[in-house]
Image (cartoon, rainbow, N blue to C red):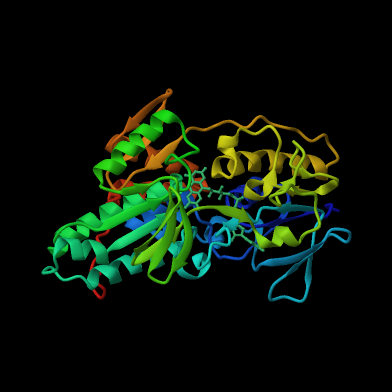
Amino acid sequence: MAQERKKVLIVGGGFGGLFTALELAESTNVTLVSDDDHFCFRPLLYEYLSGEVEAWHIAPDYKELFGAEINFVRAAVEEVDFKNRKAKISSRDELLDYDALVLAVGGVTNFWNVKGAEEFTLPFRTIADADRIRNQMVRALDKVSPTLAPQDARKKLTFAIVGGGASGVELATKMSDLLEDAFLRRGLKGEAHVLIVEMSDKIVPGMGEDIREYVEKVLLEKHIDVNLQTKVLEVKPHGIVYEHNGEQSEIETVTTVWTAGVKVNPLIEKLDLPKDEHDLILVNPTLQVRNFDNVFALGDIAKLEEVSPILVGTAQIAFQESELLAKNIKAFLSGKDLKTKQFQELGEAVSLGTRDGAVIVGGNVVGGFLARDARFALYTSRLPTWHHRLKVGASWFFGGTSPKPLQPLGIS
Ligand SMILES: Cc1cc2nc3c(=O)[nH]c(=O)nc-3n(C[C@H](O)[C@H](O)[C@H](O)COP(=O)(O)OP(=O)(O)OC[C@H]3O[C@@H](n4cnc5c(N)ncnc54)[C@H](O)[C@@H]3O)c2cc1C
């Protein structure tokens, strides 16, 4: 009689959880629980905002990605009983049991308790967030008439992005290009005001000097207003209060987007597991949670010693960890020795608007349209499942990846 397959429960269907599930699918009884019905390939979320890619390209439904081997449950895990190996999920009374548990619930936006930030800014982590930002841009543009003087149009179309990391810069450059195009199409005078507010003394602080120089050049060319060593003190419904050089000022904004931080998912705060001062779960090099042999954690919620700081909080490491984790789960379930792995920096690539990008090739920065296309090709190769990659690759090859203009509401 065939032996019953051991149960692996994976919580969270992002880079860590989804890729682990796909690696394990053929050999194990896998259940993936995630609170959304689709994956999100976040490195291309900026391109979704600009219309260069479609939602189905970067956010495929789990049901489309999984064959019969993976059992998908759309729900949020609310509690875990580690002793009895059971997880409680929203909307169901029954508990899900497991032999091995994988925690991969990622992070959430950190508003750092700045007054009004959670209430009056838009985060940028999901397809729905990108839709909201795009809709607000369209609505704001619709209120500006071609007869309005340039300085008034600029004031009415001030978009602030809080956080000058890669996310803030990629978002600002996309928004700037979309707005530039909209000004031309709608015959508006002047240009919109896109500003970045960054607390530290440099833009993209996590990136190398060479790529930063290129990013700074592009920001200057696009007239993006970069405010360094500037701290947001309060966000209001239509503006931000900030401090620079000890002086407080206020600026009116039509939309403020918050890209200034990530913290661990609230589920992790609740769980009684070993953690560091930032609530990151302490894991061994095998990705087992310390002192919990059958519980594994990876991605944005896991703290692994001796990992390059550049890799912390990235899809790059979550993706590499998923490969090791799948192997170690198989080893754990069959009583074999678990392995460790050195994680690599897979390179830096940023999108800088709809016509530009920057990538590092052989240690040198390559910028421009070529870099934009190279980034697209690189990311196509990292999408989940060969079947999905093929469909998306074909769609980009035959259909192109041109941005969609910010049309007035009602026109598509
Ligand atoms: C806009 C943006 C752009 C980025 N670009 C890059 C980039 O270019 N390169 C790079 O390396 N990294 C990038 N990152 C970072 C990268 O996305 C994360 O590091 C990566 O997604 C972490 O993977 P993860 O599996 O830990 O978590 P996630 O990918 O966040 O996945 C977590 C999953 O868990 C689900 N979930 C949450 N709570 C529960 C619960 N209680 N129950 C069940 N499911 C739950 C979520 O819905 C989600 O599906 C970017 C991030 C953002 C926000």
Query: Which residue is nearer to you in this view: 23 or 228?
Result: 228
On screen, residue 338 versus residue 391, left or right, reads: right
On screen, residue 3 versus residue 328, left or right, reads: right
Q: Which image quadrant for residue 345?
A: top right
Residue 4, visible in the rendered structure: yes
Question: Which residue is depicted at the point 26% across and 52% down?
Answer: 177
Tell me the quadrant of the picture where the C terminus can be found. Answer: bottom left
Query: Which residue is nearer to you in this view: 135 or 8?
Result: 135
Question: Which residue is depicted at the point 66% across and 29% down?
Answer: 342
Residue 109 pos. (x, y %) = 55, 58
Residue 100 pos. (x, y %) = 79, 52
| The furthest residue to the front | 246
- Please determine whether, in this image, residue 324 is positioned above or below residue 196: above
Query: Which residue is nearer to you in this view: 115 or 102?
Result: 115
Residue 70 pos. (x, y %) = 65, 57
- Count of marks, rendered view: 0
Residue 62 pos. (x, y %) = 56, 60
| The furthest residue to the right | 83
Question: Which residue is depicted at the point 65% across and 34% down?
Answer: 307
Residue 406, visible in the rendered structure: no
On screen, residue 128 versus residue 92, left or right, reads: left
Q: Which image quadrant for residue 286?
A: top right
Question: Which residue is depicted at the point 33% across and 52% down?
Answer: 174
